[in-house]
Amino acid sequence: MPMPRWWGQVNKRVFNPRAVAGGKWPVLTHVGRTSGATYHTPLDAYPVDGGYLFVLVYGSGSDWVRNVLAAGGARLRVDGREVELAVPRLIGEDEAFQALPDKVARPPRLLRITEFLRMDLATG
């Protein structure tokens, strides 16, 4: 796991609410897989052909990732608009780097991030 889980808990409780309220970050809206509660998680969202790519800084075991995979999709607020995303799937570093535009910086190797989440724009 690239980043320690305790830092994720600090982010979730301290920084994420401020980021959501600030309106500058893309925000993923997803439903809890057991609670059914709606959650809003600020994330880096990178547009790729037909959808978005998310860098899994805390790995695929993060609550938001597990929620999205269980639900089969989520909504993303980005650039002042909402998009519906579907078909979430975990992908590796090679596939992620091929999908990302060249101008997008890759995560530093020091962080050892090897998992990414890709979702397609929902149709219909």
Image (tube, rainbow, N blue to C red):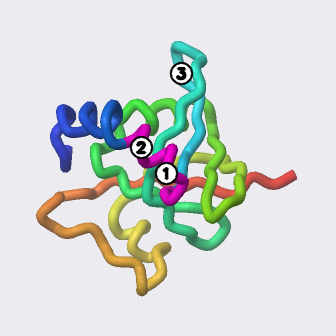
Residue at 16%, 40% (x, y): give it: 4
* Separation of marks 2 and 3 at Cα, in angstroms: 24 Å
- Please tell me how crowded label 2 is: few (under 14), some (14-19), or many (20+) other residues with Cα within 10 Å: few
Residue type beneath disc 1: Gly
Checking the image for residue 90, the label placed there is: none
Checking the image for residue 22, the label placed there is: 1
Q: Magenta stretch mostly in which secondary structure?
A: helix
Checking the image for residue 18, the label placed there is: 2
Are discs 2 and 1 less than 8 Å apart at CB? yes
Whether 50 is drawn above or below 81: the answer is below
Q: Is residue 116 left or right of residue 9?
A: right
Q: Nearer the N terminus, badge 2 or badge 3?
A: 2
Magenta part of the protein: which range?
16-25
Residue 24 placed where, x, y %? 50, 59
- Residue extending furthest bottom? 102
Q: Is residue 24 magenta?
A: yes
The residue to which callout 3 is attached is 33
Of 72 and 74, the residue lying toward us: 74
Q: Is residue 11 left or right of residue 30?
A: left
In front: mark 1 or mark 3?
1
* Separation of marks 2 and 1 at Cα, in angstroms: 6 Å
Q: Is residue 15 magenta?
A: no
- Residue extending furthest left? 110
In front: mark 2 or mark 3?
2
Q: Nearer the N terminus, badge 1 or badge 3?
A: 1
* Local secondary structure at mark 1: helix
Q: Is residue 36 left or right of residue 6?
A: right
Residue at 20%, 44% (x, y): give it: 1
